[in-house]
Structures are given as structure tokens and as C-alpha cells.
Image (cartoon, rainbow, N blue to C red):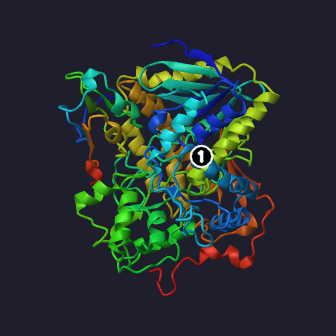
């Protein structure tokens, strides 16, 4: 069966000015229990790749540069 | 695609690095530093499991001067409608205080009075067992330090998929798949401790968001499914977990923090309708009556409290366990000072931490499969919470070390390994098929439609029929990358758990545990026929089967009046409808 892509608004926002993933930081990616963050291949910064967030906050709390903001997912707000 | 898994060998493999798992691994290494112990974690042990953001308190602390082990065993026996193995509860209760002191020594901070005693609070119906941890956000850091100190080896981002046995039926290995690459791993071992947490991705939250669950959604029932396929028995799965939560946010409100400070669950008129906010099936039934009746919705009421008290509640609730509660309220303009917080009930799940279902273990943490142990929310000791996970983690670690010294395990069945390799790799090979999220949504929507209490025979039978149809479609699961393979394999576990939930519920032909097993076709509690554990297992022909297991004679007698205590939760004068 063919598969299509549905767009979603995702809760984790990365401030690309502050994010230092392009300098090798992987903290938010490593601590996420659901493994939803990864490196954006276009700019080397972290981004939310999968819409599977528990809004639990390790990514935000452990970020060394305060670049991560976790919003409550749209469906729950 | 790798044609065969990498092979490695350990004496002991602990699956799950949340709460019970690290304690099990550290305890085993402390007992025998020569053992090779591996902690396998699907996420990263720094921030994994139910307590990834810490915990705001102990809900079942048995502390001298406040409670005795015997009193605790009586309370949980009564709260769980009598269906308990008291020896397992007692094994927990007798070690509860030593574990608190051990954690205290490791640097976990518990609330103490001015004179330095533990500041225990009352939330339960009968005794005092709640010990606040206002600084509980750093528990995971403390556990990680102990793992490093004990030299436990850690593999993060590996999902265990199947347990393997030798020809004698003894645990002999674990199959695992990496979640970020196509690699697979075959770990030869002599013992496995399952610490995989609850099956929390079973029902669909009312929001419809797959990951907006009460439980950490990594806890999807992998351990329950692996234990089942390995031939272990699972106990009382029909005793679902259903919790009172903040509506939509779907996290605890949280009565255990607010109740000792004067907060309470109220109906739409701001009136208290339950005497006690401790989570039991009976409490949930009263909650359900109020929600469905003319007095709903239900709220957490704090607006009568003093400013200092509310500020303290905010500080604890918005920094621990589920700290995003604060921003949820803020966005909606909900202020504890002026408004009550709307509550609802959670989706169903299996979780012994709050209810009573799970992989059967005895007081030594042993399952019914030699070499297999289980602890924490995945195992069957009722109302175990975080402290119970720590205690049974330690017990499992000790038992495994002792048993390993006695015996050995043989070779794994290579045909089984080959079959598992095919199952694990298949989603990556299916290009046009069903994405895991879509199949998961369908299963969990059907769980809500057909299994959510009140339970009805015909509906559960229809549910089983639908689950059977989806089982035929499992080979259509398509994973675009290793991350989606992780989700696809979780869908297998979720479907197994859905079938187990239906099978177990159909088997127990009575109603028990309040809302958890409210069975419309059999509305009364029937102690003559059903005062027993129900055990679910895979029979010799590979079919799902159930049997009764007698409740062991009580070692701590319960008198008649005490026995009914949790049936008198409704505040007099607050009519159900």
C-alpha cells in the first residue's frame, strides 16, 4: 500500500542561535527518552524529527545553552 | 542488512534502566563484583523510565514510628480486595526503611522535620506512608553515579525483543535491536531481570495523542510481551491501571502531594465526595460515578488554601516528576489560587506500581521461568510504586546472583534466533505497507472501544476479533528507518498486551477492584469462585490460556471490619448520581 506524509506541528522548539549541535553537542538528542530529536542535516542544529513527545523536559533542562523549549503538544493544550 | 546478530556474553542482563533496573544491576555487582553485568536500555539511562525527571515523594514508605510492615500489608491487602500474596508485600515492607536509608546515604533528599526525622504524611485510608521529596528531581543522576561506581556495563538505545531459553527451559539469552542503526545483538546470559516498566501505551489517551500517556510512553509492555513469549505467567492482568489525572495534560494532579497540604478531589460543586485520595480501584469507581453523573466533572480543589501552601505545591509539582504541568496550566490561565483544576481518568494500562497486574513474581523476585526475574511496574507485587521498584530491584539482583552461583545455562536454540532475526528485520524490508503509528493508533483506539471498563463480554470478544485481524497484518508494518523499526516492534508488544488484557478480563467472571475490573455481565464480587489470582500464560500449543492460582493463606490476618474499609470511601451525603 502506498504511504504519504502528514505534516504536524511539533512541541520541541530549538533556538538555532543558541544551539551548539554543529559544534558537536548531542545532549538533548542523547537524553530524550523517546529519541525524537536528531541533527537537522541542513544546518547541523538539533531539531524535532518525530512527533512522539512526552513533554517530559530532559532535553530542555539538560541543554547547556538553554536552546530548547518544550511546549505542550497541540492536541493537549 | 546484517545477516546475523553480533554476539556477546554476560552473566546477568538487566533489561530496563529506569528505577528497578539500575538498583538490580548495582546490587548484583555489589554482591559479586566478579560478575559481568549488563544494563540494557531502550533510551538512555541518564534520563529513562518513569522517573526521568525525578519523583516528588515516596507513596509507600514503611517507617518505624509511623507504620509497621504488618500494618502496611493489611492496608494493601484491603486496598487490593484481598487478592495479594502477602509474603511478597511483607518482603517489600520489611525492607522499605532500609532502602530509604540506603537512598538517603546515596544523596536522595527526603523531607525531614526540624528534629531530623522523616516527615511522613497521611494519604492512605488507614495508615501513614507518604514521604515527600521536594528535591526529588535528581534521583536519576544519583542512580547513574552508583551504576558507574559499581562498574555496571551499560548499552543504551538497545531494545530487547525476545528472551531465549536453552533446551531445559532455563533463560540463556536475550535478542536485542539497536534503535538508531540496523544492528542486532544476541546476548548469551545465565539470568535476566526484567525491569521494563508498565504497559503504558495500551489505551489511547482521550486527547488522541499517542504519546500523551500517563506513563512514560517508552514503557509500552515490551517486558510483558517478552515474558509471555518466554513462557512466564502473568498475574491479574484484568486489574487494569486507571488513574485520576489532569484532563488533557494526562499527568497526575497530584493528590499525594496536595492531600497532606489540604487539597482534595471535588465535584463540580466544589464538594468532597471521596474520603481518601489514595489511588485504589474503589476510589476510581467513585471518581467514575461522579464524572458520569450529574455532579461531574471532577476537579482538584486547592483554591481554599493559603498562599504559602499553594506556592509550596507549585514549587513541588512544577519541578518534579511531570514538571511541564506548570506550563500547561499557564497557557490555559489556570491558577490554583482561584480555579479548580479539571480532572479526568487515564487510559487503561498494566502497572503494578499503582494497581496489581504484571509478570508473576514471588518474594524472591523469581518469575515462573528459571533464570528470569522481574521487578518494578512490570512485576506483579501490587501498589509497589517507586520504592517497591527499588526494593524488588535489589531483591532480584540478590536472587539472580545466588542462582547464578548454583547453576548454568546451555545453548540458545539457533532456529529461534534465526526466526527472531527475520521478525526484527522485516519492517525495514517492507517499503509499501502500514506505518507503525497508524497501526498503533488503530489497536489502541480499539482497546478504548472494547476493553475500557465497564467491561462487557460481547464487546471484549469483538475486540479480540479485531486484534486477531490486526495480527494478520503485522507483516505489513513498514519502517522507514531504525527508529520506526523500534516503533514497529513496540506495536507487536502493544498488540500482545491488548490481547492479554481482553483474555484476562473475559476469564475473571466477577467484578473486583472497583473500576479496574467492573464487569457488567458479572456485576458482583464472587469470593466463592474468584478469590484467586488469575494467571495468564502461553500453553503447550502456543495459545493464550488462563488458570487460577489460590491466594496463599494470609500471614497477617485481616478482621472483618478492616476488610471492607476501602468499600466505604464515599463521603456520606454525597450521592453517587
- The residue carrying pointer 1 sits among few (fewer than 14), some (14 to 19) or many (20 or more) residues within 10 Å by Cα, namely few
Camera-side residue of B102 and B457:
B102
**Residue furthest to the bottom:** B573
Q: Is residue B213 above or below residue B489?
A: below
Query: Which chain hosts label 1?
Result: B
Provide the residue designation for mark 1: B105
Q: Where does residue B111 sit, x and y in percent of width and height?
A: 51, 59
Outermost residue on the left side: it is: A17
Image coordinates for residue B244, horizontal then vertical, percent:
45, 63
> Is residue B486 visible from the viewing direction of this image?
yes
Q: Indicate the quadrant where residue B97 lies.
A: bottom right
Residue B103 lies, in percent from the top left, at: 59, 47
Provide residue B551's location: percent of width, then percent of height: 76, 59
Give the vertical position of A55 relative to B13 (above or below): below
Residue under the point 44% across and 54% down: B448
Task: Name which residue lies at 57% across and 33% down.
Answer: B147
In the picture, which quadrant includes the C terminus of chain B?
Answer: bottom left
Q: Please state if B577 lies on the left or on the right of B363 as rendered.
A: left
Residue B516, quarter of the rendered image = bottom right
Residue extending farthest front: B115
Compare residues B401 and B245 and report the one nearer the observer. B401
Amino acid at each position: 500500500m502506498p504511504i504519504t506524509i502528514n505534516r504536524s506541528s511539533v512541541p520541541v522548539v530549538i533556538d538555532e542561535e543558541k544551539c551548539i549541535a554543529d559544534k558537536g553537542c548531542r545532549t538533548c538528542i542523547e537524553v530524550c527518552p523517546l529519541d525524537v530529536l536528531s541533527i537537522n542535516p541542513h544546518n547541523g542544529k538539533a531539531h524535532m524529527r518525530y512527533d512522539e513527545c512526552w513533554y517530559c523536559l530532559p532535553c530542555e533542562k539538560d541543554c547547556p545553552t538553554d536552546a530548547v523549549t518544550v511546549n505542550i503538544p497541540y492536541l493537549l493544550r | 542488512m546484517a545477516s546475523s546478530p553480533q554476539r556477546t556474553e554476560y552473566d546477568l542482563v538487566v533489561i530496563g534502566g529506569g528505577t528497578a533496573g539500575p538498583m538490580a544491576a548495582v546490587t548484583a555487582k555489589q554482591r559479586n563484583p566478579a560478575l559481568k553485568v549488563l544494563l540494557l536500555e531502550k533510551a538512555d539511562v541518564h534520563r529513562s523510565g518513569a522517573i526521568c525527571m525525578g519523583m516528588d515523594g515516596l507513596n509507600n514508605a514503611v517507617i518505624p514510628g509511623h507504620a509497621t510492615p504488618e500494618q502496611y500489608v493489611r492496608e494493601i491487602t484491603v486496598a487490593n480486595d484481598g487478592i495479594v500474596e502477602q509474603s511478597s508485600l511483607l518482603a517489600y515492607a520489611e525492607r522499605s526503611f532500609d532502602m530509604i536509608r540506603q537512598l538517603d546515604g546515596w544523596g536522595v533528599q527526603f523531607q525531614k522535620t526540624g528534629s531530623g526525622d522523616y516527615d511522613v504524611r497521611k494519604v492512605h485510608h488507614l495508615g501513614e506512608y507518604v514521604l515527600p521529596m521536594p528535591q526529588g528531581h535528581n534521583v536519576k543522576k544519583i542512580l547513574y553515579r552508583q551504576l558507574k561506581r559499581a562498574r555496571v556495563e551499560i548499552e543504551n538505545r538497545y531494545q530487547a525483543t525476545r528472551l531465549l531459553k536453552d533446551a531445559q527451559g532455563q533463560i540463556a539469552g536475550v535478542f536485542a535491536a539497536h534503535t538508531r542503526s540496523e544492528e542486532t545483538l544476541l546476548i548469551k546470559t545465565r539470568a535476566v531481570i526484567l525491569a521494563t516498566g508498565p504497559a503504558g501505551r495500551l489505551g489511547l489517551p482521550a486527547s488522541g495523542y499517542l504519546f500523551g500517556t500517563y506513563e512514560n510512553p517508552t514503557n509500552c509492555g515490551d517486558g510483558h510481551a517478552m515474558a509471555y513469549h518466554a513462557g512466564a505467567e502473568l498475574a491479574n492482568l484484568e486489574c487494569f491501571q486507571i488513574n485520576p489525572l489532569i484532563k488533557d495534560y494526562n499527568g497526575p494532579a497530584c493528590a499525594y502531594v496536595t492531600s497532606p497540604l489540604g487539597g482534595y478531589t471535588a465535584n463540580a460543586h466544589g464538594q468532597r465526595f471521596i474520603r481518601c485520595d489514595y489511588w485504589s480501584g474503589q476510589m476510581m469507581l467513585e471518581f467514575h460515578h461522579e464524572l458520569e453523573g450529574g455532579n461531574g466533572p471532577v476537579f482538584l480543589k486547592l483554591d481554599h488554601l493559603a498562599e504559602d501552601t499553594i506556592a509550596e505545591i507549585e514549587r513541588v509539582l512544577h519541578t518534579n516528576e511531570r514538571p511541564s504541568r506548570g506550563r500547561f496550566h499557564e497557557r490555559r490561565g489556570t491558577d490554583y489560587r482561584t480555579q479548580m483544576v479539571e480532572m479526568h481518568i487515564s487510559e487503561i494500562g498494566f502497572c503494578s506500581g499503582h494497581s496489581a497486574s504484571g509478570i508473576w513474581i514471588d518474594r524472591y523476585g523469581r518469575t515462573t521461568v528459571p533464570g528470569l526475574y522481574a521487578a518494578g511496574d512490570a512485576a506483579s507485587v501490587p501498589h509497589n510504586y517507586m520504592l517497591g521498584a527499588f526494593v524488588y530491584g535489589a531483591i532480584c539482583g540478590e536472587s539472580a546472583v545466588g542462582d547464578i552461583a548454583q547453576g548454568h545455562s546451555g545453548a540458545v536454540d539457533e532456529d529461534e534466533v534465526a526466526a527472531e532475526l527475520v521478525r526484527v528485520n522485516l519492517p525495514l524490508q517492507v517499503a509499501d505497507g502500514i506505518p507503525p503509528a497508524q497501526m498503533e493508533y488503530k489497536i489502541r483506539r480499539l482497546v478504548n472501544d472494547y476493553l475500557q471498563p465497564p467491561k462487557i463480554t460481547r464487546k471484549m470478544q469483538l475486540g479480540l476479533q479485531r486484534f486477531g485481524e490486526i495480527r494478520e497484518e503485522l507483516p505489513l508494518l513498514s519502517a522507514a528507518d531504525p527508529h520506526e523499526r523500534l516503533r514497529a516492534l513496540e506495536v507487536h508488544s502493544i498488540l500482545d498486551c491488548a490481547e492479554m488484557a481482553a483474555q484476562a478480563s473475559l476469564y475473571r467472571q466477577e467484578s473486583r477492584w472497583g473500576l479496574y475490573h467492573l464487569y457488567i455481565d458479572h456485576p458482583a464480587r464472587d469470593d466463592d469462585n474468584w478469590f484467586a489470582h488469575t494467571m495468564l500464560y502461553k500453553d503447550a500449543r502456543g495459545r493464550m490460556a488462563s488458570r487460577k492460582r489460590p491466594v496463599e493463606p494470609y500471614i497477617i490476618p485481616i478482621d472483618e471490619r478492616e476488610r471492607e474499609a476501602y468499600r466505604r470511601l464515599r463521603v456520606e451525603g454525597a450521592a453517587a448520581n
